[in-house]
Image (cartoon, coloured by chain):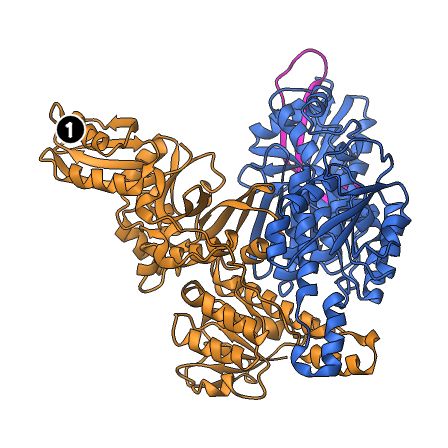
Chain colours: A blue, B orange
């Protein structure tokens, strides 16, 4: 099968290299996958790929060329990637993508067109790199009911939090991550949680068989996190992670991405560096944990190639050889083009709970005047919004404002925010330094 | 699709219950799976399954009955399970099995017959319960090269080791595990490592695309483990696990199951209770860790049903509807019976290294006479077999024989055993109390 590429960045080049390095083994298994052509912005730019791969700036050379059997989309971004994929699918070409934005925002359209065309669309690489979580949810756990999925799905922010735990402030940590190649020149989407929100939307949609869109995911990044929060959390037996969490509740699907304190005993609490990890809780399968490199060209390339090989294997199926001439003829065609049924599993109508109604325990970090009655005033604001306090901790008196920490019982996020807004307005409160979620209380 | 069961124990009943409880959701997705009949030894024995399920003691009623489309084998043991499965496959009936013994010992025959018949055989549930490791290795990582797979794949022994870490001796720990339902009446195959060896043989065969048979796996259980070993290991920064380890080396595939000390920092060191966990190391995908319940009816049932649904989904494929009459006719038949290509991936000819040539660092626990020159004599025996010592530790003098611990540098297991045999013969050595593998030195 001749493969055309849309984009040829780190992941694309790693896929080309993998197919090149493994071509003999794959061919020996009847799975010959030949990178033929790649759409790139600048064909002159040097890339570490075999000379045989033709570079072109013309999308049609990949999307409409008769010598392309299968399309790999690794250009990223919603557009023009989505339009290109739709065009390839309509032309009957299977598509494998690593593009989380396109799948999260336009997955419905992509899967519908793929189903109409009876052509496979696969996107294992769009979430958590080499971790085979999409296939696990779609196939292995298809018989069970997932009740919760929690994940560390953004390596950059996890790496930055790790450096902050070692004493760096946010700015320095981000700079170091960039220098070490663990953060992009502009890591905004990693730090503000929107990258994780895309991945959670994809995972929740599969896990709960109902469409969850990124804009429905309550999202907050790590920009407000301070070293003090990390240190105090540790004192209280927590580790802070940028957690992507979705669960099925009475009210519907709750989904949010927030800096979240996990008890040190939580299976995701110890996940460090750029590693990704996912906890899938099912009614029957119990707690399954998947952990591995969530990014990097080679790791992500294994996921892309896993999808390519699934498609290639299905084309190998000998068809209905036993069924006589008419069928034999058909089966030849089938061999060349196996049709597939709908791959989309978002069939259930389940409401997605608006972020302000998602219930979570919270950690609140204030800087207040060191004066009698302050705690009472703050506690009053919380009580006024039915937020009850599980733990309060006034830190040792220092110069100027005094830090005060609260851990609340589970409350709707909206109530927490409203209370915090009011608290921020109190004359005795110098600053609201942090509001984060707390898991497992 | 009408499902016939071979065996109806804990797992079988859980599968029937799952299909019953989820029948509406599955039917809505076009995946109607109806448990029709089950082969059992004693049809009179009460079971928690719907009355609609017919119980029979006659294999033919499941294997040859025209009203069975698909067979689930959950009876366990190599025979008669394997003969039954071969018969079902030859008759064109897809088979899903949770039977590690049959797959480990007769997988080659089963997969060959399945390929000849063009009928799917699936066995996700045969290893590590709900953890989707078979699918991950066969599909998701098919493009990468796995270099090592290490796992805790026997929950009973892991639970027993946990109790021993808490101070129980082996006998008491096994009794408690049995009382709490975490060990079978006769847990021999769990404790002596042969259960884990079957699972490792299956995993290594897939991971390295080469057949590894259980009898080729160097196997040692936990019966020799003492509380002291666990305590001293901890002092030295290790946790003891019954580890199933297979790696690709210059010499070939090394595969063994042994009590193994893992550095506390190892991703598998913290896995407690009956949980199973697997570390897969790939050239490109890096280290992937999978963790979850390795046994239990409901957890294992999700794996069985995941396989059932994969087969059912493929029968849903609309066939080549667009290819005209001859094809349409064929596709109708295809819809009813999708043929599949070879599922076996053991294509490479790779030698399996005999256990005595497998290289590992080791922990040696001796009880010796408290007399000068003893260490020198023991060290002499080790040196005579080219086993070099990384660490030696003489424990505080007590009554009678004194415990002495050695940690060696990596050496062939045969050399270690030969040296230990000689050491056991030394007059100054009261007892060889323990010989175990050590990872990560």
What is the x, y in percent for residue A173?
A: 69, 22
Q: Give the residues drawn in magenta, as a range.
A: A389-415
Residue A408 sits inside the magenta stretch: yes
Which image quarter: residue B404?
top left
| Residue B402 at x, y percent in the picture | 17, 31
Which residue is at 75% across, 82% downward?
A326
Q: Quadrant of the C terminus of chain A?
A: top right
- At horizontal 84% and vertical 65% (from top left) the residue drawn is A117
* Label 1 SS: helix
Residue B81: name its quadrant: bottom left
Left-right relation of A268 to B190? right
Q: Image height check: is B290 above or below B50?
A: above
The N terminus of chain A: image quadrant? bottom right
Q: Residue furthest left?
A: B427
Count the marks: 1
Query: How busy is the neighbourhood of tag 1: few (under 14 within 10 Å), some, or many (20 plus)?
Result: some
Q: Chain of mark 1?
A: B
Above or below for A263 versus B334: above
Q: B131 or B427: nearer the eye? A: B427
Q: Nearer the viewer, residue B413 or B265?
A: B413
- The percent position of residue A321, horizontal first and vertical second, equals 66, 77
Q: Is residue A23 left or right of residue B437?
A: right
Q: Position of residue A242 (x, y in %)?
A: 69, 36
- B399, A393: nearer the viewer: B399
- Would residue A332 be found to the left or right of residue B428 on screen? right
* Residue A152 shows up from this direction: no
Q: Is residue A291 left or right of residue A104?
A: left
Image vertical order of residue B351 relative to residue B13, above or below? above
User: Which residue is labeled 1 in the image?
Assistant: B377
């Amino acid at each position: 099968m001749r493969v055309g590429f849309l984009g040829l960045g780190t992941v694309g080049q790693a896929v080309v290299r993998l197919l090149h390095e493994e071509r003999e083994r794959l061919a020996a298994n009847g799975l010959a996958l030949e990178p033929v052509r790649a759409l790139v912005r600048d064909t002159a730019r040097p890339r570490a790929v075999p000379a045989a791969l033709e570079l072109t700036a013309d999308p049609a050379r990949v999307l409409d060329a008769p010598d392309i059997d299968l399309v790999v989309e690794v250009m990223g971004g919603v557009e023009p990637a989505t339009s290109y994929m739709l065009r390839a699918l309509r032309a009957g070409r299977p598509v494998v993508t690593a593009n989380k934005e396109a799948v999260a925002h336009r997955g419905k359209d992509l899967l519908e067109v793929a189903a109409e065309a009876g052509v496979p669309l696969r996107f294992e690489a769009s979430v958590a790199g080499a971790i085979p979580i999409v296939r696990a949810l779609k196939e292995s756990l298809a018989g069970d009911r997932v009740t919760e999925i929690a994940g560390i799905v953004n390596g950059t922010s996890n790496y930055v939090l790790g450096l902050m735990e070692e004493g760096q402030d946010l700015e320095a940590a981000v700079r170091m991550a960039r220098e070490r190649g663990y953060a992009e020149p502009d890591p905004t989407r990693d730090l503000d949680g929107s990258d994780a929100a895309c991945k959670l939307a994809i995972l929740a949609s599969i896990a709960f068989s109902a469409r969850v869109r990124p804009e429905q995911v309550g999202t907050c990044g790590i920009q407000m996190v301070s070293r003090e929060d990390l240190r105090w959390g540790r004192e209280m037996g927590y580790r802070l992670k940028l957690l992507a969490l979705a669960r099925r509740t009475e009210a519907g699907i709750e989904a949010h991405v927030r800096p979240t304190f996990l008890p040190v005993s939580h299976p995701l609490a110890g996940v460090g560096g750029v590693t990704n990890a996912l906890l899938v809780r099912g009614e029957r399968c119990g707690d399954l944990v998947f952990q591995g490199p969530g990014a990097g060209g080679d790791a992500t390339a294994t996921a892309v190639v896993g999808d390519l090989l699934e498609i290639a294997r299905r084309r190998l199926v000998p068809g209905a050889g036993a069924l006589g001439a008419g069928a034999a003829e058909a089966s030849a065609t089938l061999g060349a083009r196996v049709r597939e049924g709908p791959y989309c599993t978002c069939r259930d109508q389940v409401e997605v709970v608006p972020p302000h109604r998602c219930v979570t325990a919270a950690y609140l970090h204030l800087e207040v005047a060191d004066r009698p009655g302050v705690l009472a005033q703050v506690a009053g604001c919380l009580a006024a919004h039915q937020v009850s306090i599980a733990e309060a901790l006034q830190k040792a008196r220092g110069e100027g404002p005094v830090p005060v920490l609260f851990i609340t019982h589970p409350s709707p996020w909206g109530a927490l925010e409203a209370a915090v807004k009011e608290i921020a307005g109190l004359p005795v409160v110098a600053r609201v330094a942090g509001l984060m979620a707390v898991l497992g209380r």
